[in-house]
């Protein structure tokens, strides 16, 4: 261990508290029992699909585009997941096939 | 404890994609942390108290002499800043959950947030117990993965490179599910396009905060059109 147990524990505690702070913030700003402003209610409704869209990009943020393999494994796997899901609507099938395909692509093909 | 057994049984199938993803990205975290010289108990402790994927990956780098506490707070805040926006969609849902809501808030990871907001609760199960079960199970996968990685990660016989794509695939699946509902399409397009533009401008390490702010701004600009869709997206 590079640090003492005390310092290590303190770091974990700081990371934990900071992370919790980001998650709890809206609940402190709009506490239980207080009317939620219309604007925030609207935002709550439309934000979820927008965040899901952002998270797809977030997951792919380290994809290499400009040099080989030019993001081809990611593109192929994402398209397969999407098409398979539109076709069969089975979460586990779409995710399972997509992940195994992606692993095969980056481990053997590219 | 009435109803919990049923809630867990009913919720489990919805969490299987997270099970797959969390076990393996948890293992990756455990391996990295163990390589720093920390035993599996430390990995378990961090996954119990912190519970954040990219946050914990980053945190592994904090355990070196001379790293300041202020840096710890700042870097952790920056990597998790997107979470500030998650609760906005869950205010009403969590406020009906009594004391359980504090755990629900603590457990708001990307994956749990996505499941809680997009899963339709089966009719024959109590809603708050069902949602609680999803959160508890998701964290248990994360803790388990971290422990496995810290204990045995370096000697795992299979080549697991690329297994973390399970998480990407989960979000693609949820994206497609949301797309089926016409009213989600414009927000989804905004989310993807803004994120890509922000990624190109700010780079992979710092695009999330500007992207989130631009998304919120655009959603306000489009309010007149988008607010017409009356029913709730995140029930």
Image (cartoon, coloured by chain):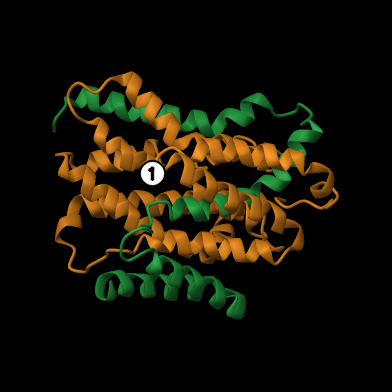
Chain colours: A green, B orange
Identify the image quadrant of residue B120: bottom right
Rendered position, B174 above or below A10: below
User: Residue lying furthest front in this view?
Assistant: A66
Is residue B20 in sight in this rendering?
no
Residue drawn at x 38%, y 44% as measured from the top left: B54
Label 1 Cα crowd, 10 Å radius (few <14 / some 14-19 / many 20+):
some
Place of residue B135 in the rendered image (x, y in percent of width and height, measured from the top left): 51, 49
User: In the picture, residue A29 is in which quadrant?
Assistant: top right
What x and y, as percent, mark residue A80? 49, 75
Q: Nearer the viewer, residue B126 or A29?
A: A29
Q: Secondary structure at mark 1?
A: helix
Considering only vertical position in the picture, is B141 above or below A39? Answer: below
At x 76%, y 57%, the residue is: B183
- Residue B109 vertical position relative to residue B102 in the rendered view, above or below: below
Residue assigned mark 1: B54
Residue drawn at 72 percent across, 63 percent down: B123
Q: Is B228 left or right of B51, judged from the image as shown?
A: right
Q: Residue at x 67, y 59 (%)?
A: B121
How far from the left and from the top, in percent, is residue A98?
A: 44, 72
Q: How far from the left and from the top, in percent, is residue A104?
A: 31, 75
């Amino acid at each position: 261990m590079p640090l003492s147990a005390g310092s290590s524990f303190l770091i974990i505690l700081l990371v934990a508290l900071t992370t919790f702070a980001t998650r709890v913030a809206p609940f402190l700003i709009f506490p239980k029992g207080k009317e939620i402003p219309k604007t925030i209610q609207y935002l709550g409704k439309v934000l979820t699909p927008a965040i899901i869209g952002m998270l797809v990009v977030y997951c792919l943020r380290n994809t290499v585009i400009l040099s080989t393999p030019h993001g081809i494994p990611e593109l192929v796997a994402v398209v397969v997941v999407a098409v398979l899901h539109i076709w069969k609507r089975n979460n586990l099938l779409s995710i399972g096939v997509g992940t195994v395909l992606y692993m095969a692509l980056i481990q053997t093909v590219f | 404890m009435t109803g919990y057994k049923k809630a867990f049984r009913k919720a489990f199938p919805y969490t299987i994609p997270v099970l797959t993803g969390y076990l393996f990205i948890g293992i990756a975290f455990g391996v990295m942390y163990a390589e720093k010289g920390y035993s599996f108990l430390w990995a378990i402790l961090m996954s119990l108290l912190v519970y954040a994927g990219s946050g914990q990956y980053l945190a592994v780098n904090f355990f070196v002499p001379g790293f300041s506490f202020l840096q710890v707070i700042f870097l952790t805040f920056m990597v998790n800043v997107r979470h500030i926006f998650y609760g906005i969609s869950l205010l009403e849902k969590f406020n009906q959950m009594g004391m359980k809501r504090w755990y629900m808030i603590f457990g708001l990871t990307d994956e749990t947030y996505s499941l809680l907001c997009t899963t339709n609760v089966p009719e024959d199960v109590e809603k708050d117990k069902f949602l609680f079960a999803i959160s508890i199970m998701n964290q248990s996968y994360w803790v388990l993965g971290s422990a496995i990685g810290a204990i045995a990660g370096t000697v795992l016989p299979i080549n697991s490179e690329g297994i973390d794509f399970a998480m990407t695939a989960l979000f693609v699946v949820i994206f497609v599910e949301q797309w089926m509902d016409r009213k989600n399409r414009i927000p989804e397009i905004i989310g993807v396009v803004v994120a890509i533009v922000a990624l190109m401008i700010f780079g992979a390490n710092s695009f999330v905060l500007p992207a989130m702010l631009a998304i919120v701004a655009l959603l306000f600009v489009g309010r007149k059109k988008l607010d017409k869709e009356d029913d709730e997206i995140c029930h």
